[in-house]
Image: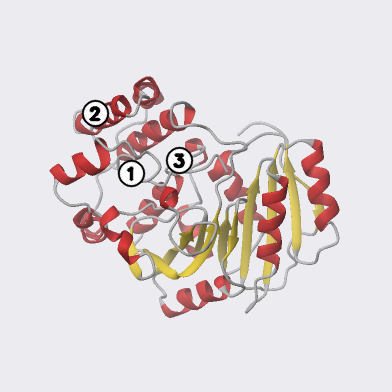
Amino acid sequence: MPGEAPRLIAGHRPGPESYDADIVILCLERPAETCAAIRSALSQRGGVFHVSVLDQNSSAETIQALTIAFATTPRFALYRSTQNLGVGGGRNFLSGCGHGRIIVGLDNDAVFHTPWTVAGALKAFRRRPDLGALGFNILGPDGTAPDLSSWGYPQLLRPKFRETFDTTTFVGAGHAIRRATWQAVGGYDPSLFFTWEEYDFCLAAIALQWRIAYDGALAVRHGPAVAARIGWDGARMTAYVRNRLLISRKWGASWCALAPRMAAYALHGAVNGCLPAALRGIAAAWRAGIPRGQPMPKVMRTYIRAHETRHRGSWLDRLRREVLSKDRKATFCEQKVAKKLL
């Protein structure tokens, strides 16, 4: 992406010594929420961690607040970009700045539920050498129930929000990735900018025979902030539709095969009063000109059927629950999490 590279404005980059985890946080405004997220990350126990924050061109006041609060904090680095790199691009940058064994992502309007969440993730990766990425339990602000706007899995699995299961994606508000997996995949696709970047990453990891899991015992508390968000009736819906269609193209779907999906998005958009945005997403995917990729290998299709498709129910159930639903926060098309810009 053109433009000046992000620069370090406070703290220090990780040293050459080995350590357990990089905790990465993206921010754009939201100074109070971002400070709370950073303090939560710095309070993690049970390992050696480095916290890295990338500001994506916030105001001078926000930058000043973050710098004053954390400039002398050990094992901390604050970077500033003069442009918004998007979710994938920003996480790629921060992940590349460190070399911890796992990369833990935390949204800047979330906090870890306990001081031992990252340590618990480390244990999960040690127990399962084939585990590539791990989604955390995204709770609401009071920590008693799941944040329904951040449930990124089939709705039939929602009663298991405190349990552990294999899956095909994770929710970016709180997650961990094995660094070896991040390196093997090559990071996120920055061209997606925001929406579906986690699912795209996970599909690439599954193709390399890594497994993806959700652990309900590892949690963050998430209080979605209003600032710097994009509404479902605008760019968010357009990006959502565009990116999902492009991911299907990457894995061998023809435009004819995608016709039912495009029709479902248009119908859902009409039901929820955002049809123009959905149609713009379809048009943007077509204009992108992504060539049709190779079909998914059999082992990948088998994994997805076992850990995603079979939990979604019949096509009639999906039509009622995912397409005709008017609850866009909890049930939008394929139950992809209603993601923030950052």
For label 2, count other residues whose C-alpha is less than 10 Å away and answer few (under 14), some (14-19) or many (20+).
some
- Name above or below for residue 132 compared with residue 196: below
- Residue at image position (57%, 43%) is 342
Question: What is the x, y in percent for residue 59?
Answer: 76, 35
Distance of label 2 from label 3 (alpha carbons): 21 Å
Judge by depth and name the residue closer to the eye, 180 or 10: 10
- Name above or below for residue 259 compared with residue 90: above
Task: Say what amino acid the circle numbered 2 marks.
Answer: Trp
Distance of label 1 from label 2 (alpha carbons): 25 Å
Describe the element under mark 3 as helix, strand or loop.
Answer: loop
Count the numbered circles shown.
Answer: 3
Which residue position holds label 1?
331
Image quarter of the N terminus = top right
Q: Is residue 252 visible?
A: no
For label 1, count other residues whose C-alpha is less than 10 Å away and answer few (under 14), some (14-19) or many (20+).
many
Mark 2 near mark 3, Cβ–Cβ under 8 Å? no
Left/right placement of residue 183 relative to residue 211 reads right
Which residue position holds label 3?
195
Question: What is the x, y in percent for residue 266?
Answer: 28, 26
Q: Give the mark, 3 or 1, whose residue is nearer the N terminus.
A: 3
Question: What is the x, y in percent for residue 121?
Answer: 51, 72
